[in-house]
Image: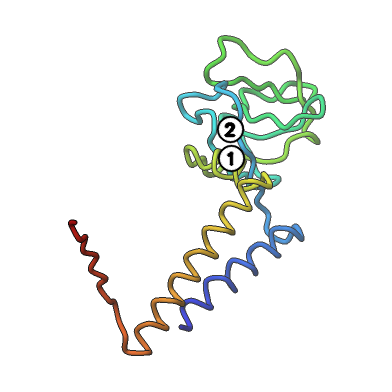
Amino acid sequence: MRKLLALPILAGTLLALYLTGTVPYRVYVIHTGSMAPAIPSRSAVLVHVGHYHAGQVVSFRVHGETVTHRLVAIGHDGTIVTKGDADTSTDPWRVPRSSILGGVVLAPHFVGFALVYLRSPLGAASILLALLAVWQTVGLTRALQASGSGARTLTITSRST
């Protein structure tokens, strides 16, 4: 029983730390294939805020969007040159260091798909309903076991006329 309580408490604590900005990591979802095959579309990336180096995949803000590409070089003026692994040339923009969010430290495939699903109202509701159904099923099973009735078999016979 203690183990069942520990998991939600741990998850809640980590969520609170993440939401308050105490944890120096951020999660972003990859929507395009510009970083394939290393980071395919529908992946999630875990970004270590403020930590990056040349050659590393980084997330940054450009034109109001969050982009995740490889940091190819740092220009003489301090701007960052980036390129998607699947792209043939470097990006047309130069990113100031202040726009770099951080370096990617983990990129689990297809996790982004689940995150987008969970962020939608319908996705979150479906997960909550599934958890409620499991909780009710477990409670009903325990109640039946406690009452000693266990599983009963119902036999249906048909009468022929």
First in residue order: circle 1 vs circle 2: 2
Foreground residue, 125 or 83? 125
Residue furthest front as drawn: 161
Circle 1/circle 2 CB separation < 8 Å: yes
| Pick the front one: 54 or 92 | 92
Nearer to us in this view, 46 or 143:
143
Q: Quadrant of the C terminus?
A: bottom left
In terms of secondary structure, where does tag 1 sit? strand
The residue depicted at 52 percent of the width and 71 percent of the height is 7
Residue 48: where, in percent of width, then height?
63, 47
Establish if 28 lies above or below 158. Answer: above
Q: Is residue 66 above or below residue 116?
A: above
Residue located at (54% from left, 43% from top): 114
Specify whether 138 is left or right of 47.
left
- Marks 1 and 2 sit apart, C-alpha to C-alpha, by 6 Å
Q: Which x, y percent locates residue 64?
A: 81, 29
Residue most toward the bottom? 147
Check disc 1 and give the amino acid type: Val
Classify 93 as above or below 71: above
* 90 relative to 157 in the view: left or right: right
* Residue underneath mark 1: 104
Q: In terms of secondary structure, where does tag 2 sit?
A: strand
Residue position marked by numbered label 2 in the rendering: 57
Residue 123 is situated, as x and y percent measured from the top left of the image, at 61, 47
Task: State left or right for residue 94 relative to residue 118.
Answer: right
Query: What amino acid is found at the position of numbered circle 2 in the picture?
Result: Val
